[in-house]
Image (spheres, rainbow, N blue to C red):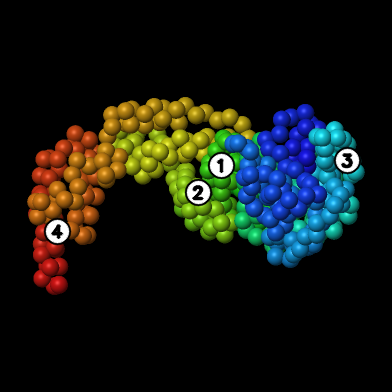
Amino acid sequence: MVGGAVRDLVRNTTPDDYDLATSATPEQVSYLFRRVIPTGIEHGTVTVLLGDKSVEVTTFRTESVYTDGRRPDSVNFVTTIADDLARRDFTINGMALDPVLETFLDPFKGEEDLHAGTIRAIGNPDERFAEDALRLLRAVRFATQLQFTIEAGTWDALGRASRSLGKVSQERMRDELNKILAAKRPSVGLRLMCGGGLLQVVLPELSAGVKVEQRGDHRFDVFEHSILTCDAAPRGNPTVRLAGLFHDIAKPASLKVDADGHRTFHGHDQASARQAETLLRRLRYPNAVIGQVTHLIRHHMFHYTAEWTDAAVRRFLARVGPENVDNLFALRQADSFAQRGSSTDLRALHTFRDRIGDALANEHALSRKDLAVNGHDLASIGIPPGRVMGTIIDYLFETVLDDPKQNARGQLLKIARSFYDSRLKDAADHGSDAG
């Protein structure tokens, strides 16, 4: 038994999964079990399925360098666990447990480093990072997840190798970033990435916020505010954590300082959404994640006051979508906390949530598909398809947002006919003649 399961057992915690290493070749392992998936058979790894559980099994091996930043150029199968452990990255990952012989193998004093809370490279750290630059991010990730410190020699080597992280595929960097963001306090890892020169490679847009001061109630610079917002976002909600991390990412580019020294960031919400989309696509995030995160960023600057009418509340819901309200409010709450690193007065937000709840309970039309008429209905009274019909549907939707009682088929058809005859019919007829 190797990897995270051994770390967990040494720390007296229950492992989430189990990885095994063996002298048996992938072909021999496949022969021994009925259900085997060749997940990485060219590198000695297969996944054995046992009931509803899966176990990754890897043949003892040594590796060459990762020239493409994705996979080792070659692997050599070896016959001893000692050789296999020597190829691993950090001492806390260089332990093994033989459950049959009940022997614990720890040639690099990983248990000692676990108890000391230390991330230390096995052997020469420069060589370990040269073998696979992703280990730079893995060092930060383990330090963040376990709340450990990185040993001085390993940290110095990390800084020297930081530029080599550019060779690693975007997907591999994204996966490590996700694990950092899932930790209790992602800010720990993000500060380490910044201090070690890794953030400038993975997220240069975020590092641009370092020392960009803000104004008003903001106590921190843009970078520190962003990572604290990420901390304050719900730990089990990666969408809101990503939105929190990137919600102000365009502030450095949006900064304007007037003659009196006042600093403004007009339009940073829209610009941040666009910039976040670019970097999330670069990191190969799924389209659904990109859409959800950028939508939250685009709408995070709403300013609710008690003067809002019920129609204004419905328009807000129509803009953001009822399904996004919880995430948007979670983002706003985290954003407010991160202004000064302390709780803020959220009574107005709670009042706003109550009013939204009332609007949803009354089942008002909050999207065009909720209208009591559709395109076929409008066509039946002589409304031509295309741009004219789209304009009328928009008008009907605005009408219903103002007065939900108007959302009845007969009434909407009457309004549509009147609007078409008085505002659009002549233009539509002239367009037809020109055609």
Q: Foreground residue, 73 or 171?
A: 73
Q: Nearer the viewer, mark 3 or mark 1?
A: 3
> Reading the chain from its start, which is encountered first: label 3 or label 2?
3
Gap in angstroms between the C-alphas marked 4 and 1 = 45 Å
Q: Earlier in the sequence, mark 2 or mark 1?
A: 1
Q: Nearer the viewer, mark 3 or mark 2?
A: 3
State the residue at coordinates (24%, 50%). 394
The residue under label 1 is which amino acid type?
Pro
Residue 160 screen position, x and y as percent: 81, 59
Furthest residue toward bottom: 434
Q: Residue at x 52, y 28 (%)?
A: 345
- The kind of secondary structure element at disc 1 is helix
- Which numbered circle lies on residue 106? 3
| Residue 28, placed above or below residue 75 | above
Q: Amino acid at mark 4?
A: Pro
Percent across and percent down for residue 22 are: 79, 47
Residue on which disc 2 sits: 289
Q: CA distance from mark 4 to mark 2?
A: 37 Å
Q: Are marks 3 and 2 in contact (CB under 8 Å)?
A: no
Residue 209 point in image, percent of width and height: 63, 52
Q: Secondary structure at mark 3?
A: loop
Q: Quadrant of residue 97?
A: top right
Give whichever of discs 3 and 1 has the lower sequence position: 3
Q: Quadrant of the N terminus?
A: top right
The residue carrying mark 4 is: 384
Query: Do callouts 2 and 1 mark residues in contact (Cβ within 8 Å)?
Result: yes
Tell me the amino acid under the disc marked 2. Val
Q: Secondary structure at mark 2?
A: helix
Residue of label 1: 238
Q: Residue at x 70, y 45 (%)?
A: 32
- Mark 2 and mark 1: span between their CA atoms? 9 Å
What is the distance, in whole Å, between disc 3 and disc 1 at their CAs?
Answer: 35 Å
